[in-house]
Amino acid sequence: MPQVKAYAAAASDADLKEISIERRDLHDNDVKIDILYCGVCHSDIHAKLNDWGNAKYPIVPGHEIIGKVTQIGSNVSKYNLGDLVGVGCMVDSCQTCSACEEDMEMWCENGSTSAYNSKDKFLGGHTLGGYSTAIVVREEFVLSIPQNLDIKAVAPLLCAGITTYSPLKHWKVKKGDKVGIVGLGGLGHMGIKFAAAMGAETVMITTSEEKAKDAKRLGANSVIISKDSEQMKAHANSFDFILNTIPVGHDVNPYLALLKRDTTMCLVGAIEPLENIHGANLILRRKNLAGSLIGGIKETQEMLDFCGKHDIVSDVEMINMQEINTAFARVQGSDVKYRFVIDMESLKN
């Protein structure tokens, strides 16, 4: 089995350190990728810390992978040597259940395989992610990257991008809609860019007055300071859609009050309990509170093509692999605008 360099944590309280890991020999429909860049997602930190109670160690995070094809299996038809490609949150699924047949592999009824921390069907043990120099992935889960984009800044599109694009597309955001983006971080900054590119009147909703200028730079038409009750009251019952990216449990009632009748607020950040949702905020104007995950492979490719057409990438800060533990601490302190991306050349030398 080929050995490659990677960064892994041996336990929830351990720093990530360099190790050697195995990648499988190529099967007929496999693509081997030399990893150039890998984004740092807050989910990487949650997984490493075992916040969700399912971590498998040693854990090699990373599911925002950009690289070049170095080897292909005999049945691979979509990719050639040297192609610029991406790999996101999923690397496999059953491909036969109703969800997979409808291009929603993230909800595979037999369980999709994540880039890391999932059962490895081929080597046993668990999958190991993109904080490594190379990866082997079946062709169906490899994505084409538009040539006109800054590939370093494309990496976070494979999680933060599709997480925000998918609900905006699903709820048919269009020109003329008034769309609120709650929270300006790794997800929120992408939500602003996508909503603006879709032609919506894009409103940043934040607790921080300091973020107003940056929100407008990213494409927001205006900003509401959610701590200002008069501002919130002035916008009551006026939004066609709200994308809520706040990553922790919070009071959703003030944001529900902003929705028009028969419209939706979608959660993409808070994967934990929400308390004290007031039923009247939903019932009196038939409002909807929904959630969304990532997107299927087909929709992720659609998102990448949309980004190529509209010249959309993430705002990133580049780091070397050896700086990853400091980067984790900075993400936890909200000290990044808006995503870290690892230059994997730093691990290859």
Image (cartoon, helix red, strand yellow):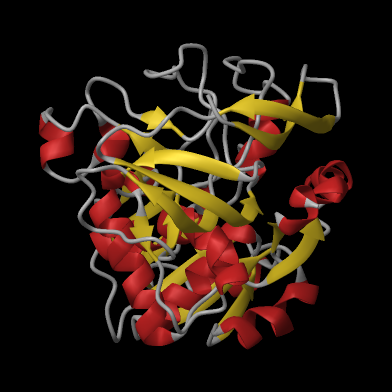
Towards the viewer: 34 or 65? 34
Whole-percent x, y for residue 231 in the image: 61, 74
Q: Is residue 6 left or right of residue 109?
A: right
Left or right: 212, with 165 as reference point:
right
**Relative to 245, 346 lies left or right:** right
**Outermost residue, top direction?**
124
Q: Tell me if residue 121 comes above or below residue 331 in the rendering.
A: above
Q: Quadrant of residue 18?
A: top right
Q: Is any part of residue 167 visible from this angle?
A: no
Q: Residue at x 61, y 79 (%)?
A: 223
Residue 162 pos. (x, y %) = 41, 57
301 vs 148: above or below: above
In which quarter of the view is residue 250 placed?
A: top right
In the rendered view, tell whether residue 112 sits above or below residue 84. above
User: At 40% across and 75% down in the image, what residue appears?
Assistant: 146
Residue at 70% x, 37% y: name it: 5
Residue 348 visible somewhere in the drawing = yes
* Residue 141 location (% of width, % of height): 32, 45
Residue 253: percent from left, percent from top: 51, 48
Query: Residue at horizontal 56%, vertical 71%?
Result: 151
Q: How many marks?
A: 0
Which residue is at the front of the view, 130 or 194?
Answer: 130
Residue 140, by quadrant, is: top left
